[in-house]
Image (cartoon, grey):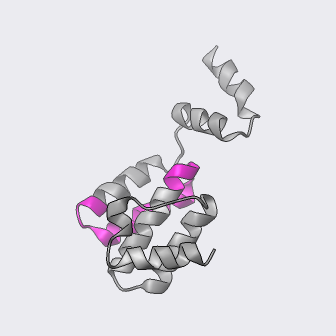
Amino acid sequence: MLAAALLAVSACGTEPVRRVQEIFQPAKGQTALQAGLKQYEDGEYAESLKNLQSAIDLGLGERDRVNAHKHAAFIHCSANRTRQCREEFRKALAVDPSMELAPAEVGHPVWGPVFRSVKAGR
């Protein structure tokens, strides 16, 4: 019965339906995303960046794709790669134009100004 219900809603393209589908059918990139976020928290930025990109390439839901691009931007900004940082923020905003950073993130002295600049330029 669950399979029939999932099949029935699979043709629907609304955001709430997509979010329900993500719960029952996790995106292929979910494992790589979780690894990349853990590596980010552990300060393993090169490895994190590889896993975040892999997660994006394998496929993620919209919210997770925004999160992956955001963290990739943080890594690039921290390494003084401003062009790549801007590009990752642009990609995140392309997925979700209403995206905002958390208060602690937007106040960060390195990536906060870059994010505000990219968002203002949209």
Is the N terminus in the top left, top right, bottom left or bottom right quadrant? top right
Q: Is residue 71 above or below residue 87?
A: above
For this rendering, which residue is in front, 92 or 121? 121
Residue at 38%, 71% (x, y): give it.
74
Q: Quadrant of residue 4?
A: top right
Q: Is residue 120 above or below residue 55?
A: below
Res. 55 visible in picture: no
For this rendering, which residue is in front, 53 or 72? 72
> Residue 78: x, y in percent?
33, 78
> Residue 54: x, y in percent?
48, 61
Tell me: 105 left or right of 22: left
Q: Which residues are magenta?
A: 40-65
> Residue 115: x, y in percent?
47, 73
- Residue furthest to the left: 42
> Residue 27: x, y in percent?
54, 44
Q: Quadrant of residue 113?
A: bottom left
- Residue furthest to the right: 11
Is the C terminus in the top left, top right, bottom left or bottom right quadrant? bottom right
- Residue furthest to the top: 1
Residue at 52%, 58% (x, y): give it.
66
Residue at 60%, 58% (x, y): give it.
96
Magenta residue check for 53: yes
